[in-house]
Image (cartoon, rainbow, N blue to C red):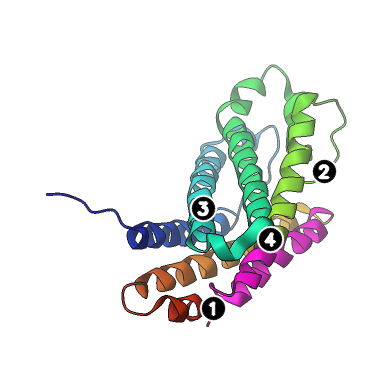
Amino acid sequence: MTIKITPRSLTRAAGVAATAAGAIFIGVQINHPHLDVTSIASTEVVVRSSLKVLMCALALAGFTGMYLSQIRRNGLLGLFGYLLISVGYLLVMSTTLASAYVLPHVVSGNPGFVEDFIAAATGGSPSGDLGALGVVLQVQGFAYLGGGLLFGIALFRARVLARWATVLLAVGGLVTVLLTVMPEAFYRLLAFPNGIAMIGLGLSLWASARLLSAQPAEDVQTAGAR
């Protein structure tokens, strides 16, 4: 039996990946325990962090499908936005992987470093010097916010996917900036705008792929944006 891989099937898979990523992004933040040197090594935090790593991988697949499915309409803005948001999520994946599987082994010998890492990763101000890791976290934040803004604008202009979701992806970064200066309980809410946006974009991408074989190309370009 031969499995036939087509642009339609790949687009649908990317839609599923984006939807799943959005759901995980929201789910892992619900009732998230307070992060400190005691909880960082707990099974619950490790499991949640592992799910965040999976979320990043799924989101990258989803963003790639969104970009490639309308590559001619995205233009240079879409390319820059896609590359920037991809860098952001790759860095989030890397730092989350470190917090899940490296920090629990470091905390017993250097709890101060772990405290500074948690502070920097959650929008706080570390008291010590994180070295190159501090730069990585700053680049991560810029790429995550800037990439969401540029890619959201490009998707909005392409008029293929659900426009409300593209707007939410773009403004989600601004909401994130506001939440980072608030207590941790509010900081956890930053996942909701982007999570909902990814769910909406994923479902819209699935719908546009489903229509590929049933409608002319011009009809498909506008169907997903309805």
Does residue 155 belong to the magenta stretch? yes
When the figure is inspected, residue 193 is found, relative to residue 51, above or below; the finding is below
When the figure is inspected, residue 157 is found, relative to residue 68, above or below; the finding is below
Whole-angstrom CA distance, mark 4 to mark 3, is 25 Å
The secondary structure type at the circle numbered 2 is loop
Q: Position of residue 34 (x, y in %)?
A: 68, 46
Image-quadrant location for residue 167: bottom right
Q: Which residue is mark 4?
A: 189
Q: Residue at horizontal 38%, vertical 62%?
A: 12
Q: Amino acid at mark 3?
A: Thr
Pick the front one: 93 or 167: 167
Q: Residue at horizontal 64%, vertical 38%?
A: 91
**Residue 124's disc number:** 2
When the figure is inspected, residue 52 is found, relative to residue 160, above or below; the finding is above
Label the magenta part by its dominant secondary structure.
helix
Whole-angstrom CA distance, mark 4 to mark 1, is 27 Å
**Residue 64's disc number:** 3
Q: Amino acid at mark 1?
A: Ala
**Residue 225's disc number:** 1
Span shown in magenta: 152-181
Pointer 4 with pointer 3, Cβ within 8 A: no
Q: Residue at horizontal 41%, vertical 60%?
A: 11
Q: Amino acid at mark 4?
A: Leu
Q: Amino acid at mark 2?
A: Gly
